[in-house]
Structures are given as C-alpha cells and as structure tokens.
C-alpha cells in the first residue's frame, strides 16, 4: 500500500472514532476524561486486519484464541467506574489485545498499568503492540492469580474475564485499602458487573447490571 492510501485510512479511522465518542457521550453517564481516553486510542490498531473496518462500531470483536475485545461502551463504563487519577497504579486481569490497557494508560500513564494475560501468544502480541504504539504497559504472560506478587499494592484492579464465583482473593489482596475493583462475576448467562470498594472493615459492593464476558480460567 502507498502512503497516500495509508493517510486516507488514518483519516477515515479518526473520523469514525470521533463519531463513536460523540455517540457514547450521548448514551453514557461517564466522565469527559474517560471519553478523551477512548478518543485517544486507535482501536483499529489492536484488531486483526479483517476486523479493522468494524473498529469504531460499538460492539465486541474476535481477537483470536476464542477471546474478544470488549465493546467500546463497556470499556468506557468499566474505566469510569474505577475513578482513576493520573498516577494511580492499576492491575488488569486479561490483557487480550491490549486495547483496554491502552485506554487506562491514557489516564494513569502506561508505566502505571500492569496487566496479566493467560494465553502466551496474546500476551506477547499485546506487549509488542502496546510498546510500538507508545504505551509503556507491563504485560505478564500467565495466570493473573500468580502475577505481580512482589509489586506494591495497586490503587485499582479490573477483570476483563468473569470468575464463576466472586473475584478471587488472590486479586483482591493485590489492592490497597481504599482501592477499587471492577469485574464481571458469575457464570455465562448470569454475569453481573460489580464495583468493590475495599474498606478497612469490609467491602462495599455496587451492582452495575448484566454483562457477558469470557470466563476466567
Ligand atoms: N481487555 C481485553 C479483553 C480481553 S478478553 C482487550 O481490551 O482486548 C479477556 C482475556 O482474559 C482473554 O484474553 C483471556 O485469555 C484472559 N484470561 C482469562 N483468564 C485469565 C487468567 N486467569 N489470568 C489472566 N488472563 C486471563
């Protein structure tokens, strides 16, 4: 492909992305900072070539290995629920293609995002892609339950795969008192999106509706 064709594609993608963000602004009650992060990340660059033309439709798409990239509105809602501040340290469970990590990195800084991905090929591809696009995210290949054990406590964590029961203790233990965890929980067909606020004397839980995510392994 010549450079002119590439430039035309980039301009098309950018226009489609701005339209998507305008649509999300009308439909969702989320912070402008969250929408700015969605507007900043080139979602098409995270997708296999054959799905790129769909990149700015508000729907999940396949990314290989039977996994999916979440729909933009879901990424926006989950990111917003984490109430992130620049500099917060965030733990992501399920890197997938790396898109959601990039959106969070736009708010907190890539060096503050730590992500674990179970499928080694996805982890490797996401690490390479994130770094190529300028996001200094740390990606661990393997079960998130075993990842970043020696890291300082995180300000927030989120899961992009659904544990059958509840958020595993091994993940909750990684988050500081006063921190937040956002996750889909429950078995396929009955999953709920929840936000957990970790307090010294227990956990406050709020429900944010029915969702559909791939199961946590
Ligand atoms: N945030 C991703 C969505 C990925 S889908 C994106 O923007 O593309 C959920 C991912 O969770 C899958 O890639 C799956 O392999 C991964 N996963 C499932 N169980 C896991 C576990 N125990 N530890 C780490 N990753 C896990």
Image: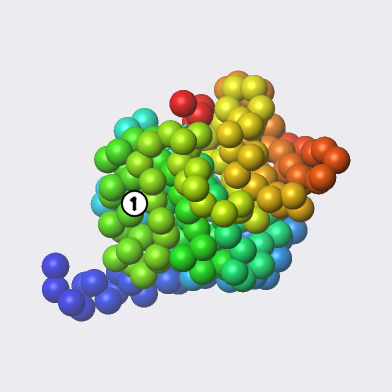
Q: Residue at x 69, y 32 (%)?
A: 192
Name the foreground residue: 206 vs 4. 206
Where is residue 160? Give x, y as percent: 53, 41
Q: Residue at x 27, y 76 (%)?
A: 7
Residue most extreme to the right: 201
Q: Quadrant of residue 191?
A: top right
Name the foreground residue: 206 vs 9. 206
Where is residue 164? Give x, y as percent: 60, 22
Residue most extreme to the left: 1
Image quadrant in which the N terminus is located: bottom left
User: For mark 1, what is the residue?
Assistant: 126
Looking at the image, residue 209 sits to the left or right of residue 55; the answer is: right
* Disc 1 crowd, CA 10 A, few/some/many (<14, 14-19, 20+): many
Q: Residue at x 33, y 45 (%)?
A: 123
Name the foreground residue: 141 vs 66. 141
Q: Eyeballing the image, is 85 above or below 169?
A: below
Name the foreground residue: 59 vs 180. 180
Q: From the Cβ of disc 1, is ligand 1 less than 8 Å away? A: yes
Where is residue 175? Give x, y as percent: 65, 47
Q: Eyeballing the image, is 1 above or below 91?
A: below
Where is residue 133? Give x, y as percent: 34, 67
Which quadrant of the render holds ligand 1?
Answer: top left
Looking at the image, residue 76 sits to the left or right of residue 69; the answer is: right
**Applied colour scheme:** rainbow
Q: Is residue 175 visible?
A: yes
Q: Is residue 23 visible?
A: no
Number of numbered discs: 1
Looking at the image, residue 71 sits to the left or right of residue 166; the answer is: left
Q: Residue at x 71, y 59 (%)?
A: 83
Q: Secondary structure at mark 1?
A: helix
């Amino acid at each position: 492909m010549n450079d002119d064709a590439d430039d035309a594609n980039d301009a098309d993608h950018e226009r489609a992305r701005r339209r998507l963000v305008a649509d999300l602004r009308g439909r969702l009650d989320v912070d402008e900072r969250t929408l700015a992060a969605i507007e900043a990340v080139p979602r098409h660059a995270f997708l296999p070539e054959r799905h790129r033309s769909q990149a700015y439709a508000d729907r999940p798409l396949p990314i290989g290995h039977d996994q999916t990239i979440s729909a933009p509105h879901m990424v926006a809602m989950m990111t917003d629920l984490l109430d992130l501040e620049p500099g917060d340290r965030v733990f992501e469970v399920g890197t997938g293609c790396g898109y959601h990590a990039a959106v969070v990195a736009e708010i907190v800084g890539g060096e503050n995002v730590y992500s674990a991905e179970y499928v080694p090929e996805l982890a490797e591809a996401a690490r390479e892609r994130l770094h190529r696009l300028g996001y200094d995210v740390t990606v661990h290949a393997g079960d998130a339950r075993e990842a970043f054990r020696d890291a300082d406590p995180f300000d927030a964590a989120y899961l992009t795969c659904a544990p059958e029961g509840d958020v595993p203790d091994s993940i909750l233990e990684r988050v500081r008192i006063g921190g937040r965890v956002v996750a889909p929980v429950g078995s396929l067909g009955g999953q709920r999106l929840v936000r957990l606020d970790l307090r010294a004397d227990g956990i406050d839980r709020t429900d944010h509706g029915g969702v559909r995510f791939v199961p946590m392994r």
